[in-house]
Amino acid sequence: MEIWPVLGRTLTDKAALTAIGMTNRDSNQNDYFNAFYLALRLMAASGAQIDQVYQILVSRGYTLPPKGLSLVYQAGEPSLNFDKDAEMKVEINNNSSETKSSVKVTVSLPNNMVYQDGNATCPTSLLDGKLVLTIGDLAAFGFKTCSFVVRLQNQTGNRYVADDFEQGLSQWVAPKDARNFGWTVNLMQPHGGKASAFVQNQGEATDLTLTLAKPIKLQVGSPILSFWHYYNTEFYSDGGVVEVSVDGGNNWQDLDSKWLTNGYNGKITSTFATPLTNRKAFTGSSQKYVNSVADLSSYIDQSILVRFRFASDIVTGIQGWHVDDVLIADQATLSSEVCLTAQEGDQVCTKSNFMVVFSTPVDAERPALPITHEMEKIWPNPFKEQANLRFRVAKPQKVNVTLHDLLGRHVGEVFSGMVQGGDWQSLKLEGATLPNGVYFCRIVGEDFSEVQKMVLLR
Protein backbone atom coordinates (compact mmCIF):
# COMPACT_ATOMS: atom_id res chain seq x y z
CA MET A 1 0.00 0.00 0.00
CA GLU A 2 1.19 3.52 -0.82
CA ILE A 3 1.54 6.24 1.81
CA TRP A 4 0.19 9.20 -0.14
CA PRO A 5 -3.46 7.93 -0.33
CA VAL A 6 -3.42 7.77 3.50
CA LEU A 7 -2.05 11.28 4.02
CA GLY A 8 -2.94 13.13 0.87
CA ARG A 9 -0.45 14.78 -1.45
CA THR A 10 0.06 17.96 0.59
CA LEU A 11 0.85 16.30 3.91
CA THR A 12 2.96 13.61 2.22
CA ASP A 13 5.07 16.22 0.42
CA LYS A 14 5.42 18.35 3.54
CA ALA A 15 6.58 15.40 5.65
CA ALA A 16 8.94 14.24 2.90
CA LEU A 17 10.60 17.65 2.60
CA THR A 18 10.88 17.94 6.37
CA ALA A 19 12.50 14.48 6.55
CA ILE A 20 15.07 15.58 3.98
CA GLY A 21 15.88 18.57 6.18
CA MET A 22 16.24 16.31 9.24
CA THR A 23 18.68 13.86 7.61
CA ASN A 24 22.09 14.28 6.01
CA ARG A 25 24.49 12.58 3.62
CA ASP A 26 25.41 9.96 6.22
CA SER A 27 21.76 8.92 6.71
CA ASN A 28 20.45 5.66 5.29
CA GLN A 29 16.93 4.79 4.10
CA ASN A 30 15.84 3.64 7.55
CA ASP A 31 17.02 6.96 9.03
CA TYR A 32 14.98 8.84 6.41
CA PHE A 33 11.72 6.99 7.10
CA ASN A 34 12.20 7.42 10.84
CA ALA A 35 12.51 11.15 10.16
CA PHE A 36 9.41 11.00 7.93
CA TYR A 37 7.44 9.26 10.69
CA LEU A 38 8.69 11.78 13.26
CA ALA A 39 7.67 14.67 11.02
CA LEU A 40 4.12 13.27 10.77
CA ARG A 41 3.86 13.08 14.55
CA LEU A 42 4.81 16.75 14.82
CA MET A 43 2.43 17.87 12.09
CA ALA A 44 -1.33 17.86 11.80
CA ALA A 45 -1.63 14.16 10.95
CA SER A 46 -4.37 12.30 12.81
CA GLY A 47 -3.72 9.33 15.07
CA ALA A 48 -5.35 7.02 12.52
CA GLN A 49 -3.11 8.32 9.74
CA ILE A 50 0.02 7.94 11.86
CA ASP A 51 -0.96 4.38 12.78
CA GLN A 52 -1.55 3.46 9.12
CA VAL A 53 1.79 4.90 8.03
CA TYR A 54 3.47 3.04 10.89
CA GLN A 55 2.02 -0.28 9.69
CA ILE A 56 3.04 0.42 6.09
CA LEU A 57 6.64 1.25 6.99
CA VAL A 58 7.01 -1.71 9.36
CA SER A 59 5.57 -4.07 6.72
CA ARG A 60 8.26 -2.83 4.34
CA GLY A 61 10.97 -3.86 6.80
CA TYR A 62 11.87 -0.49 8.32
CA THR A 63 12.68 -0.32 12.04
CA LEU A 64 10.59 2.32 13.84
CA PRO A 65 10.17 3.16 17.55
CA PRO A 66 8.15 0.49 19.40
CA LYS A 67 4.49 1.13 20.18
CA GLY A 68 3.62 2.57 23.57
CA LEU A 69 5.99 4.32 25.97
CA SER A 70 9.70 3.93 25.36
CA LEU A 71 12.86 5.71 26.34
CA VAL A 72 16.45 6.16 25.26
CA TYR A 73 19.14 6.93 27.82
CA GLN A 74 22.46 8.13 26.50
CA ALA A 75 25.37 10.44 27.12
CA GLY A 76 25.88 13.65 25.20
CA GLU A 77 29.22 12.28 23.94
CA PRO A 78 30.13 8.74 22.80
CA SER A 79 32.80 8.45 25.49
CA LEU A 80 32.99 10.28 28.81
CA ASN A 81 35.97 11.52 30.79
CA PHE A 82 36.63 11.07 34.50
CA ASP A 83 37.12 14.27 36.55
CA LYS A 84 34.89 16.15 34.10
CA ASP A 85 31.21 17.01 33.90
CA ALA A 86 29.11 15.00 31.46
CA GLU A 87 25.70 15.72 30.03
CA MET A 88 23.23 12.83 30.15
CA LYS A 89 20.05 12.72 28.05
CA VAL A 90 16.77 10.84 28.47
CA GLU A 91 14.42 10.78 25.47
CA ILE A 92 10.84 9.82 26.33
CA ASN A 93 8.62 8.66 23.47
CA ASN A 94 4.83 8.14 23.61
CA ASN A 95 4.28 6.26 20.38
CA SER A 96 0.56 5.66 21.02
CA SER A 97 -2.80 7.35 20.38
CA GLU A 98 -3.42 7.96 24.10
CA THR A 99 -2.15 10.72 26.38
CA LYS A 100 0.04 9.38 29.20
CA SER A 101 -0.33 11.26 32.49
CA SER A 102 2.01 11.90 35.45
CA VAL A 103 5.00 10.51 33.58
CA LYS A 104 8.18 10.21 35.65
CA VAL A 105 11.68 8.93 35.00
CA THR A 106 13.79 7.50 37.82
CA VAL A 107 17.55 7.33 37.25
CA SER A 108 19.81 5.08 39.34
CA LEU A 109 23.29 6.58 39.19
CA PRO A 110 26.44 4.61 40.08
CA ASN A 111 28.67 6.00 42.85
CA ASN A 112 31.10 7.47 40.32
CA MET A 113 28.36 9.63 38.75
CA VAL A 114 27.41 12.55 40.99
CA TYR A 115 24.39 14.64 39.97
CA GLN A 116 25.18 18.36 39.60
CA ASP A 117 22.22 20.33 40.91
CA GLY A 118 20.75 23.16 38.84
CA ASN A 119 21.70 21.87 35.39
CA ALA A 120 18.63 19.80 34.47
CA THR A 121 16.13 20.79 31.78
CA CYS A 122 13.23 19.07 33.59
CA PRO A 123 12.04 19.40 37.20
CA THR A 124 14.21 17.07 39.29
CA SER A 125 14.39 15.72 42.83
CA LEU A 126 16.42 13.15 44.74
CA LEU A 127 14.54 10.26 46.35
CA ASP A 128 16.32 7.43 48.18
CA GLY A 129 19.53 8.25 46.35
CA LYS A 130 17.87 8.17 42.93
CA LEU A 131 17.29 11.07 40.54
CA VAL A 132 13.61 11.63 39.64
CA LEU A 133 12.74 13.58 36.47
CA THR A 134 9.15 14.85 36.39
CA ILE A 135 7.83 14.83 32.84
CA GLY A 136 4.10 15.42 33.53
CA ASP A 137 1.51 14.60 30.88
CA LEU A 138 2.80 13.37 27.53
CA ALA A 139 0.41 13.83 24.62
CA ALA A 140 -0.45 11.11 22.13
CA PHE A 141 2.50 10.57 19.75
CA GLY A 142 4.44 13.12 21.80
CA PHE A 143 7.99 12.99 23.03
CA LYS A 144 10.29 14.95 25.25
CA THR A 145 14.02 15.15 25.93
CA CYS A 146 15.37 15.86 29.41
CA SER A 147 19.04 16.38 30.17
CA PHE A 148 21.05 16.66 33.34
CA VAL A 149 24.72 16.95 34.28
CA VAL A 150 26.82 14.52 36.32
CA ARG A 151 30.40 14.70 37.47
CA LEU A 152 32.53 11.59 36.98
CA GLN A 153 35.00 11.15 39.81
CA ASN A 154 37.01 8.88 42.12
CA GLN A 155 38.84 6.93 39.43
CA THR A 156 42.38 7.10 38.07
CA GLY A 157 43.87 6.01 34.77
CA ASN A 158 45.95 7.08 31.80
CA ARG A 159 45.44 8.60 28.39
CA TYR A 160 48.11 7.96 25.76
CA VAL A 161 46.85 9.34 22.45
CA ALA A 162 43.98 11.66 21.57
CA ASP A 163 43.94 12.92 17.98
CA ASP A 164 41.11 14.51 16.01
CA PHE A 165 43.42 15.42 13.08
CA GLU A 166 42.67 19.13 13.43
CA GLN A 167 46.45 19.63 13.43
CA GLY A 168 47.03 17.32 10.49
CA LEU A 169 48.96 14.05 10.63
CA SER A 170 51.56 15.39 13.10
CA GLN A 171 51.31 12.31 15.35
CA TRP A 172 51.47 9.84 12.45
CA VAL A 173 53.65 8.55 9.62
CA ALA A 174 51.84 8.25 6.27
CA PRO A 175 54.27 7.21 3.50
CA LYS A 176 53.35 7.72 -0.15
CA ASP A 177 53.77 4.90 -2.66
CA ALA A 178 55.50 5.22 -6.03
CA ARG A 179 52.36 6.80 -7.57
CA ASN A 180 52.06 9.33 -4.73
CA PHE A 181 49.03 7.56 -3.22
CA GLY A 182 48.75 7.71 0.56
CA TRP A 183 46.83 8.86 3.62
CA THR A 184 46.03 12.57 3.78
CA VAL A 185 44.04 15.06 5.84
CA ASN A 186 40.54 15.51 4.43
CA LEU A 187 38.31 18.51 5.14
CA MET A 188 35.21 17.28 3.32
CA GLN A 189 33.74 14.65 5.66
CA PRO A 190 35.03 14.76 9.27
CA HIS A 191 33.28 13.09 12.19
CA GLY A 192 33.71 16.22 14.27
CA GLY A 193 35.63 19.44 13.91
CA LYS A 194 37.07 20.26 10.50
CA ALA A 195 39.26 17.32 9.46
CA SER A 196 39.72 13.57 9.32
CA ALA A 197 42.47 11.23 8.15
CA PHE A 198 41.53 9.79 4.77
CA VAL A 199 42.77 7.31 2.19
CA GLN A 200 41.12 7.06 -1.21
CA ASN A 201 39.97 3.73 -2.62
CA GLN A 202 41.96 3.79 -5.87
CA GLY A 203 41.09 1.59 -8.83
CA GLU A 204 44.64 0.29 -8.64
CA ALA A 205 46.61 -2.08 -6.41
CA THR A 206 47.59 -0.26 -3.20
CA ASP A 207 48.82 -1.02 0.32
CA LEU A 208 48.75 2.23 2.32
CA THR A 209 49.39 2.71 6.04
CA LEU A 210 48.86 5.38 8.69
CA THR A 211 51.15 4.60 11.66
CA LEU A 212 51.75 6.26 15.02
CA ALA A 213 54.99 8.21 14.80
CA LYS A 214 56.34 7.01 18.16
CA PRO A 215 55.67 3.95 20.33
CA ILE A 216 53.59 4.25 23.50
CA LYS A 217 54.16 2.08 26.57
CA LEU A 218 50.91 0.84 28.04
CA GLN A 219 50.88 0.86 31.82
CA VAL A 220 48.85 -1.36 34.14
CA GLY A 221 45.18 -0.48 33.66
CA SER A 222 42.42 -1.14 31.15
CA PRO A 223 43.64 0.37 27.85
CA ILE A 224 41.47 0.52 24.75
CA LEU A 225 41.73 1.89 21.22
CA SER A 226 38.69 3.89 20.16
CA PHE A 227 38.14 5.64 16.83
CA TRP A 228 35.33 6.87 14.61
CA HIS A 229 35.37 5.95 10.94
CA TYR A 230 33.34 5.99 7.77
CA TYR A 231 34.24 3.64 4.93
CA ASN A 232 32.88 3.25 1.43
CA THR A 233 34.92 0.69 -0.51
CA GLU A 234 34.44 -2.02 -3.09
CA PHE A 235 32.79 -4.75 -1.02
CA TYR A 236 34.91 -7.90 -0.45
CA SER A 237 37.66 -6.55 -2.73
CA ASP A 238 39.04 -3.45 -0.97
CA GLY A 239 39.12 -2.55 2.70
CA GLY A 240 41.04 -1.67 5.83
CA VAL A 241 42.40 -3.31 8.97
CA VAL A 242 43.99 -2.11 12.21
CA GLU A 243 47.26 -3.63 13.37
CA VAL A 244 49.61 -3.43 16.37
CA SER A 245 53.38 -3.92 16.56
CA VAL A 246 55.35 -4.64 19.75
CA ASP A 247 58.81 -4.63 18.09
CA GLY A 248 59.02 -1.17 16.58
CA GLY A 249 57.20 -2.00 13.35
CA ASN A 250 59.09 -5.09 12.20
CA ASN A 251 56.10 -7.38 12.71
CA TRP A 252 52.39 -6.59 12.93
CA GLN A 253 49.44 -8.29 14.62
CA ASP A 254 45.84 -7.84 13.50
CA LEU A 255 43.33 -6.63 16.11
CA ASP A 256 40.69 -9.04 14.77
CA SER A 257 40.19 -10.86 18.09
CA LYS A 258 40.34 -7.66 20.19
CA TRP A 259 37.23 -5.80 19.01
CA LEU A 260 34.74 -4.83 21.71
CA THR A 261 32.34 -2.93 19.45
CA ASN A 262 31.92 -2.56 15.68
CA GLY A 263 34.66 -4.92 14.53
CA TYR A 264 35.33 -6.09 10.99
CA ASN A 265 32.22 -6.57 8.88
CA GLY A 266 33.49 -8.75 6.05
CA LYS A 267 36.33 -10.70 4.46
CA ILE A 268 38.49 -9.67 1.51
CA THR A 269 37.98 -12.32 -1.20
CA SER A 270 39.02 -10.46 -4.35
CA THR A 271 40.07 -12.65 -7.28
CA PHE A 272 42.79 -10.04 -7.84
CA ALA A 273 45.24 -10.57 -4.99
CA THR A 274 45.81 -7.82 -2.41
CA PRO A 275 47.89 -7.89 0.79
CA LEU A 276 44.62 -8.37 2.70
CA THR A 277 43.16 -11.22 0.65
CA ASN A 278 41.46 -13.83 2.89
CA ARG A 279 41.59 -11.48 5.89
CA LYS A 280 38.68 -9.92 7.77
CA ALA A 281 38.42 -6.17 7.24
CA PHE A 282 36.25 -3.09 7.19
CA THR A 283 34.82 -3.38 3.67
CA GLY A 284 31.82 -2.18 1.68
CA SER A 285 29.93 0.76 3.18
CA SER A 286 29.39 1.66 6.83
CA GLN A 287 26.61 4.07 5.68
CA LYS A 288 27.75 6.62 8.30
CA TYR A 289 30.44 7.18 10.92
CA VAL A 290 30.65 4.32 13.44
CA ASN A 291 32.70 3.99 16.63
CA SER A 292 34.98 0.94 16.80
CA VAL A 293 36.64 -0.01 20.09
CA ALA A 294 39.37 -2.61 20.64
CA ASP A 295 40.79 -4.06 23.87
CA LEU A 296 44.54 -3.42 24.26
CA SER A 297 44.95 -4.99 27.71
CA SER A 298 47.03 -7.88 26.32
CA TYR A 299 49.74 -5.32 25.45
CA ILE A 300 50.18 -3.92 28.98
CA ASP A 301 53.86 -3.31 29.89
CA GLN A 302 54.78 -3.29 26.19
CA SER A 303 55.64 -0.43 23.87
CA ILE A 304 53.28 -0.54 20.91
CA LEU A 305 52.72 1.09 17.56
CA VAL A 306 49.25 1.18 16.02
CA ARG A 307 48.54 1.51 12.33
CA PHE A 308 45.54 1.75 10.01
CA ARG A 309 46.17 -0.22 6.82
CA PHE A 310 44.14 0.02 3.61
CA ALA A 311 44.56 -2.16 0.51
CA SER A 312 42.81 -2.23 -2.87
CA ASP A 313 42.98 -4.35 -6.01
CA ILE A 314 43.31 -3.26 -9.64
CA VAL A 315 39.55 -2.98 -10.24
CA THR A 316 36.88 -0.37 -9.30
CA GLY A 317 37.85 2.65 -7.23
CA ILE A 318 35.33 4.52 -5.06
CA GLN A 319 35.46 6.79 -2.05
CA GLY A 320 37.71 5.21 0.60
CA TRP A 321 38.21 5.28 4.38
CA HIS A 322 37.84 8.21 6.79
CA VAL A 323 39.29 7.83 10.30
CA ASP A 324 38.73 10.43 13.03
CA ASP A 325 38.85 11.02 16.81
CA VAL A 326 41.44 8.35 17.60
CA LEU A 327 41.85 7.66 21.32
CA ILE A 328 44.13 5.28 23.23
CA ALA A 329 43.35 5.44 26.95
CA ASP A 330 42.31 3.46 29.99
CA GLN A 331 38.58 2.96 30.20
CA ALA A 332 35.93 1.79 32.61
CA THR A 333 32.29 0.88 32.09
CA LEU A 334 29.65 2.45 34.31
CA SER A 335 26.11 1.06 34.36
CA SER A 336 23.05 3.18 35.06
CA GLU A 337 19.39 2.12 35.01
CA VAL A 338 16.40 4.32 34.18
CA CYS A 339 12.73 3.48 34.70
CA LEU A 340 9.78 5.24 33.09
CA THR A 341 6.33 5.16 34.71
CA ALA A 342 2.91 6.66 33.97
CA GLN A 343 -0.35 6.89 35.90
CA GLU A 344 -1.99 4.49 33.45
CA GLY A 345 0.25 1.71 34.72
CA ASP A 346 3.00 1.81 32.09
CA GLN A 347 6.47 0.89 33.30
CA VAL A 348 9.56 0.61 31.12
CA CYS A 349 13.10 0.13 32.40
CA THR A 350 16.39 0.04 30.55
CA LYS A 351 20.01 -0.20 31.61
CA SER A 352 22.74 1.64 29.73
CA ASN A 353 26.48 1.11 29.88
CA PHE A 354 28.74 4.12 29.40
CA MET A 355 32.35 3.92 28.34
CA VAL A 356 34.39 6.30 30.46
CA VAL A 357 37.98 7.12 29.55
CA PHE A 358 40.64 8.72 31.68
CA SER A 359 41.78 12.24 31.05
CA THR A 360 45.27 12.34 32.60
CA PRO A 361 47.81 12.48 29.72
CA VAL A 362 50.84 10.21 29.90
CA ASP A 363 52.79 12.08 27.23
CA ALA A 364 52.60 15.66 26.04
CA GLU A 365 49.61 15.92 23.72
CA ARG A 366 48.10 18.61 21.57
CA PRO A 367 46.68 21.59 23.50
CA ALA A 368 43.26 20.99 25.05
CA LEU A 369 41.89 24.05 23.28
CA PRO A 370 40.69 23.83 19.66
CA ILE A 371 42.72 25.58 16.97
CA THR A 372 40.02 28.24 16.53
CA HIS A 373 36.74 27.05 18.05
CA GLU A 374 34.60 24.05 18.92
CA MET A 375 30.83 23.87 18.46
CA GLU A 376 28.71 20.96 19.69
CA LYS A 377 25.76 19.72 17.66
CA ILE A 378 22.52 21.56 18.42
CA TRP A 379 20.02 19.55 20.47
CA PRO A 380 17.26 18.58 20.51
CA ASN A 381 17.03 18.69 16.74
CA PRO A 382 14.31 18.87 15.51
CA PHE A 383 12.91 21.03 18.33
CA LYS A 384 9.52 22.46 19.28
CA GLU A 385 10.19 25.63 21.24
CA GLN A 386 13.81 25.83 22.35
CA ALA A 387 17.11 24.23 21.34
CA ASN A 388 20.51 24.24 23.03
CA LEU A 389 23.91 25.26 21.69
CA ARG A 390 27.35 24.98 23.31
CA PHE A 391 30.60 26.36 21.92
CA ARG A 392 34.03 27.55 22.98
CA VAL A 393 36.83 29.51 21.33
CA ALA A 394 40.61 29.19 21.57
CA LYS A 395 41.29 32.87 22.40
CA PRO A 396 39.27 35.83 23.75
CA GLN A 397 37.29 37.45 20.95
CA LYS A 398 33.94 38.85 19.91
CA VAL A 399 31.47 36.23 18.70
CA ASN A 400 28.14 36.65 16.91
CA VAL A 401 25.51 33.88 16.77
CA THR A 402 22.56 34.41 14.42
CA LEU A 403 19.62 32.48 12.95
CA HIS A 404 18.77 32.38 9.24
CA ASP A 405 15.94 30.80 7.26
CA LEU A 406 16.21 28.44 4.29
CA LEU A 407 16.72 31.41 1.95
CA GLY A 408 19.55 32.81 4.05
CA ARG A 409 17.52 35.69 5.49
CA HIS A 410 18.43 36.87 8.99
CA VAL A 411 15.60 35.93 11.37
CA GLY A 412 17.11 36.24 14.83
CA GLU A 413 20.04 37.47 16.93
CA VAL A 414 21.08 34.83 19.49
CA PHE A 415 24.27 36.31 20.94
CA SER A 416 26.76 39.10 20.31
CA GLY A 417 29.60 39.84 22.69
CA MET A 418 33.06 39.02 24.03
CA VAL A 419 33.87 35.40 24.90
CA GLN A 420 36.84 34.18 26.95
CA GLY A 421 39.15 31.56 25.50
CA GLY A 422 38.62 27.96 26.62
CA ASP A 423 35.34 28.43 28.49
CA TRP A 424 32.24 26.62 27.23
CA GLN A 425 29.34 28.95 26.41
CA SER A 426 25.75 27.67 26.61
CA LEU A 427 23.00 29.39 24.62
CA LYS A 428 19.27 28.88 24.13
CA LEU A 429 17.90 29.06 20.58
CA GLU A 430 14.32 30.31 20.79
CA GLY A 431 11.77 29.26 18.18
CA ALA A 432 8.57 30.60 19.77
CA THR A 433 8.17 33.44 17.24
CA LEU A 434 9.28 31.47 14.17
CA PRO A 435 7.15 29.33 11.84
CA ASN A 436 7.92 25.64 11.30
CA GLY A 437 10.75 24.99 8.91
CA VAL A 438 14.46 24.48 8.35
CA TYR A 439 16.80 27.08 9.84
CA PHE A 440 20.54 27.64 10.06
CA CYS A 441 22.46 28.75 13.12
CA ARG A 442 25.61 30.69 12.22
CA ILE A 443 28.46 31.38 14.64
CA VAL A 444 31.12 33.87 13.54
CA GLY A 445 34.33 34.84 15.35
CA GLU A 446 37.43 36.78 14.39
CA ASP A 447 39.04 33.88 12.53
CA PHE A 448 36.29 31.32 11.99
CA SER A 449 32.67 30.75 11.05
CA GLU A 450 30.45 27.66 11.21
CA VAL A 451 26.85 26.87 10.27
CA GLN A 452 24.56 24.14 11.63
CA LYS A 453 21.15 23.11 10.30
CA MET A 454 18.18 22.85 12.66
CA VAL A 455 14.52 21.94 12.16
CA LEU A 456 11.63 23.64 14.00
CA LEU A 457 8.51 21.47 14.24
CA ARG A 458 5.55 22.01 16.54
Image: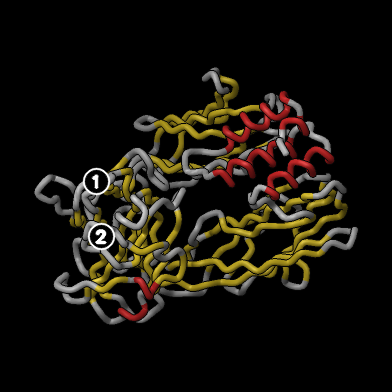
Residue at 72%, 36% (x, y): give it: 40
Q: As displayed, is residue 395 above or below residue 443?
A: below
Mark 1: secondary structure: loop
Q: Which residue is mark 1?
A: 202
Going by the numbered disc 1, the residue's amino acid type is Gln
Q: Compare marks 2 and 1 and give the one earlier in the sequence.
A: 1
Residue 326 locus on image (x, y percent): 35, 58
- Count of residue discs: 2
The C terminus lies in quadrant: top right
Q: Secondary structure at mark 2?
A: strand
Q: Which residue is mark 2?
A: 309
Is residue 358 rendered to the left or right of residue 143? left
The answer to whether one can see residue 339 in this image is yes
Considering depth in this image, is 127 or 231 the residue closer to the camera?
A: 231
Q: Quadrant of residue 246?
A: bottom left
Mark 2, mark 1: which one is toward the viewer?
1
Q: Residue furthest right?
A: 344
In the picture shown, does residue 310 fall above or below 371? below
